[in-house]
Amino acid sequence: MTKYVFVTGGVVSGLGKGITASSVALLLKSRGYKVFMQKFDPYINVDPGTMSPIQHGEVFVTYDGCETDLDLGHYERFIDEELNYTSNITSGKIYSSVIEKERKGDYLGATVQMVPHITNEIKNKVYEAGITSKADVVITEIGGTVGDIESQSMIEALRQIQYEKGSENTFFIHCTLIPYIYGSNELKTKPTQNSVRDLRNMGIRPDALVCRVPFSTPDNLKEKLSMFCSVPVGNVIDSVDVKNIYDIPINYYKQHIDEIILKQFNLPIKKADLKYWEDLIETVNNLKKEIEISLVGKYVELHDAYISVVEALKHAGYKHNLKVNVNWVDSEELEKIDNLDEVFKNSSGILVPGGFGQRGIEGKIKACKYARENNIPYLGICLGMQIAVIEFARNVCKMEDVSSREFDETCKNPIIDLMAEQKHVINMGGTLRLGNYECTLVKNTLAHKLYKSDKILERHRHRYEFNNKYKKQLEDKGLVFSGYNEPSDLVEIIENPNHPFFIACQFHPEFKSRPTRPHPLFDNFIGASKKYKK
């Protein structure tokens, strides 16, 4: 029988529930158990796909084309497992499913209510994850904080699961904050006590507390929390602030959180294999040299909008023993700047990531041109590939009125155009070209050399694509089309062989990068940037 671990949060948001859930999953996997993860978000949006990245951060895309919360990126990077549509559930998905069933008459004339219909649908999503993944343990994070109105139905569903499956098959971790009060120089447990009281009032008694603290909690405070929260003192876990998030699983391991869970589940406590993770920490903590990469984006005011890109850069840095520092460049502001030498003076590489809409586009084109003309390593992702093609057409091929139909419907030369299957799409949510698509690589190209393969699978998220009508004009001037999707004849990768390192792709390679296994494009981009710096 699948076991279930639920991670809830209290006091304030942003305590690191996602990292806690990922760390627990990593520890259980290190002991030989198959784990699967999912995130429940209380918002009414069906998914974050239509949300502004500035408001919600990055939209992470799973291999099967599900647009999800950025926490799923943390999950995949920590446990090195591909997640799917069962991994991100929102209130919007739950309500939509229940309403659709009601319209079809599935409830046989019953009055549809929060309990049991909404809660049953939530439970079904939890159980579905266990059935489809065939995991030993499913770890479910509940977004927001206990006491939020929008998450009450989810907490009630978890209470029912706890009752139905029993304590030997369920484990509740509650993440809270223990604030430090300056002046009196005290750690205060009252916020945690109040949060646990709120959770217990909703019918759930946590099995363990993970307390965010600036330093280790004294034993007397742990005993106090144990007494007032009805949690064994050994199950009060410190989540101490760390400089390196990869230290967090080891911190939990030293406090035996995985053993506590396995004992409650009556599962054997196998020997943990964490050598590869400890080696990673050793590498990260001893990076001596640094390198700067300019990330030219339109959502740079919220760094979480590009979190997977930044993590992928870091992963590549670890392999090359480099600490990667990101120079955040606002593409809209860049449009007003003439002296690009000053902007990029310390940068050894320029990366233009994905995005939507016309704002800041000309700034991205300026950055791409600067990289091409100054032989600075360039990596373009999704929109970054489209930008590279537009820049090349304008400034190398000397074509006039070149743009994308996304930015200019009436341009004379729409070198980037709406995909044929997208032309009659009305609804914006979930209708992009999403998830894994196969890409065939052309031999004797940079792409083929980097991947060391003839065919690859990469994750996509876009509506617009290179217009093949202009392919020969660009090829005649030296641009190489080194990757394409055979069934649809869509261009996937372009490169400039007259440049030390200039490559751009229509897909999102950052989603497949891992701390111990950087993606080939990022790996070689940092390698080229390291060479450029020298």
Image (tube, rainbow, N blue to C red):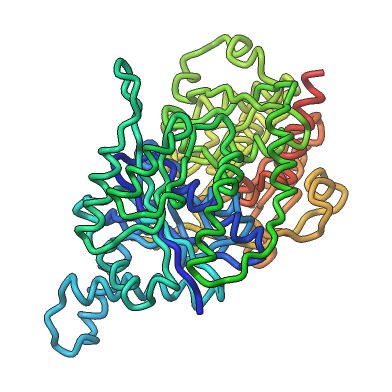
Residue 442 drawn above or below residue 237: below
| Quarter of the rendering containing residue 454 | bottom right
Q: Is residue 466 visible?
A: no
Q: Residue furthest left?
A: 111
Q: Is residue 212 left or right of residue 35?
A: left
Residue 526's x, y, as percent? 73, 32
**Residue at (22, 52) in percent of width and height:** 198
Q: Is residue 27 visible?
A: yes
Residue 321's x, y, as percent? 77, 30
Residue 47 drawn above or below residue 405: below
Closer to the camera, 526 or 401? Answer: 526
Residue 53 drawn above or below residue 139: above
Residue 25's x, y, as percent? 55, 57
Closer to the camera, 63 or 147? Answer: 147
State how many labels appear: 0
Quarter of the C terminus within the rendering: top right
Q: Is residue 80 left or right of residue 111?
A: right
Residue 523's x, y, as percent? 74, 39
